[in-house]
Image (cartoon, rainbow, N blue to C red):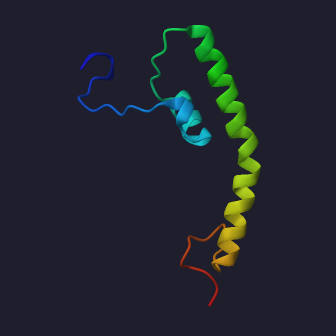
Amino acid sequence: MGVLHTGEVDVLVLDEAPPLLAAGVLREGYVCCRDEEALREFTRDRLVWAADLQPFLRWHERTLLRALGASPTRPPGEGAI
C-alpha cells in the first residue's frame, strides 16, 4: 500500500498524545502535515518536552522499583528475598 508497503496503519493525533509517545512517532514514524514550518516547530517542542521529562521519569521508575523490592538492574519480581 503506497509508501508504507502495508495494509496496517495506526492513526494518532500527536498534539493530544503523551509527550514520549509523540516524540517516538516524530523520531521513527511517518507524519503527514501540510505545513512544514508548523511541523518543524511542533517536532522541536515535543522533543524538548520529552527530553525535559526524562530525568523525572527515570527517578520515578527507580523509586517505584525500590518500593516494589526490585532493582533497576533486575526485572520486577526478582527482588531481594
- Which residue appears farthest toward the front when viewing the image? 16
Please name whichever residue, 78 or 62, is drawn nearer the observer in this view of the structure: 62
How many callouts does the rendering have? 0
Where is 57 relative to 49, above or below?
A: below
Q: Residue at x 49, y 14 (%)?
A: 33
State the image coordinates of residue 61 (x, y, percent, origin top left). 67, 62
State the image coordinates of residue 79 (x, y, percent, origin top left). 61, 81
Q: Residue at x 63, y 78 (%)?
A: 68
Picture quarter containing residue 24? top right
Please name whichever residue, 65 or 71, is drawn nearer the observer in this view of the structure: 65
Q: Is residue 61 left or right of residue 2?
A: right
Where is 61 relative to 21, above or below?
A: below
Picture quarter containing residue 3? top left
State the image coordinates of residue 41 (x, y, percent, origin top left). 67, 18
Q: Residue at x 53, y 38 (%)?
A: 17
Q: Can you say which quadrant of the picture contains the C terminus?
A: bottom right
Where is 57 relative to 9, above or below?
A: below
Q: Residue at x 66, y 67 (%)?
A: 72
- Which residue appears farthest toward the bottom when viewing the image? 81
Q: Can you say which quadrant of the picture contains the N terminus?
A: top left
State the image coordinates of residue 29 (x, y, percent, origin top left). 47, 28
Q: Is residue 1 left or right of residue 55?
A: left
Picture quarter containing residue 45? top right
Q: Is residue 52 left or right of residue 46?
A: right
